Amino acid sequence: MKFARVWGGLILAAMLTADLTAQTEPTPPAPPQDAPAQGKHETTELGKWMDHMNSAFRNLRRQVALTEQNAASRELVAEMITGAEKARALQPEKLAEIPEADREKFLSGYHEQMDKLLTALRQLDAALAAGDNPAAEGLVRELRGVQRDGHKVYKVDRD
Ligand code: HEM
């Protein structure tokens, strides 16, 4: 009888402890709805216009040498110009890392680099309109350099 009471007490204590653990166990918080996948960053509005330029540029590179594609290539250049103008009006994310006193200079440098891009894109459109595909190919190479330089200075380095 005494044994039964002791066992009963032990079982009750075990149950209570288990219950208490269940109650105090922290519930992991639900992940935010639009959290970027691990290792990825959230795309900014500027980044979205860059992505828009990027897909047009990829298609353009494939066909820029083909005279019979010049009308379609000009449409791709027009898409890139829209993307570049939208991107120029926005501020790079990296601006937040720049000391207050240097921000104006950083932004005017960004505008100058975007203007280089826009100038090269307009020249590319003119070359395609004139059917000068070798010149157009040269301008595509130039655009890659403008892109590379722009990213080196104005894009957040995530590597
Ligand atoms: C042919 C020209 C260009 C292409 C195809 C291009 C493409 C891209 C791509 C694919 C991204 C990543 C977007 C993402 O986060 O998903 C990007 C980001 C970025 N690009 Fe470009 N880019 C070009 C030219 C430039 C130039 C000339 C500049 C600077 C003047 C520039 C500044 C930036 C910046 C600052 C970001 C990071 C976004 C942010 O800070 O919010 N890009 N670009």
Image (spheres, rainbow, N blue to C red):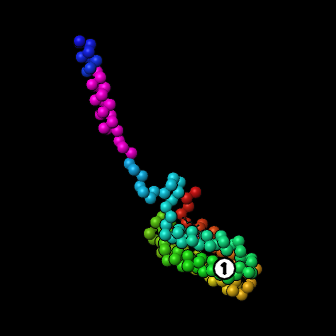
Q: Say which residue appears at 48% left-offset and 57% top-offset.
A: 36
Q: Which of the 4 quarters of the picture holds residue 110?
A: bottom right
Q: In what quadrant of the picture does the C terminus appear?
A: bottom right
Give the percent coordinates (x, y) of residue 20: 29, 34
Give the percent coordinates (x, y) of residue 52: 57, 71
- Disc 1 residue type? Ala
Q: Main secondary structure of the magenta part?
A: helix
| Residue 120 is at least partly visible in this image | no
Q: Say which residue appears at 35% left-offset and 41% top-offset.
A: 26
Q: Quadrant of ligand 1?
A: bottom right
Q: How many residues crowd around disc 1 within 10 Å: few (fewer than 14), some, or many (20 or more)?
A: some
Q: In what quadrant of the picture does the N terminus appear?
A: top left
Give the percent coordinates (x, y) of residue 125: 66, 83
**Magenta range:** 10-28
| Residue 48 is at least partly visible in this image | yes
Q: Nearer the viewer, residue 54 or 6?
A: 6
Identify the residue under disc 1: 72
Q: Nearer the viewer, residue 151 or 42?
A: 42
Left or right of 158: which side holds 133? right
SS of the residue under disc 1: helix
The tally of labels here is 1
Q: Nearer the viewer, residue 47 or 71?
A: 71
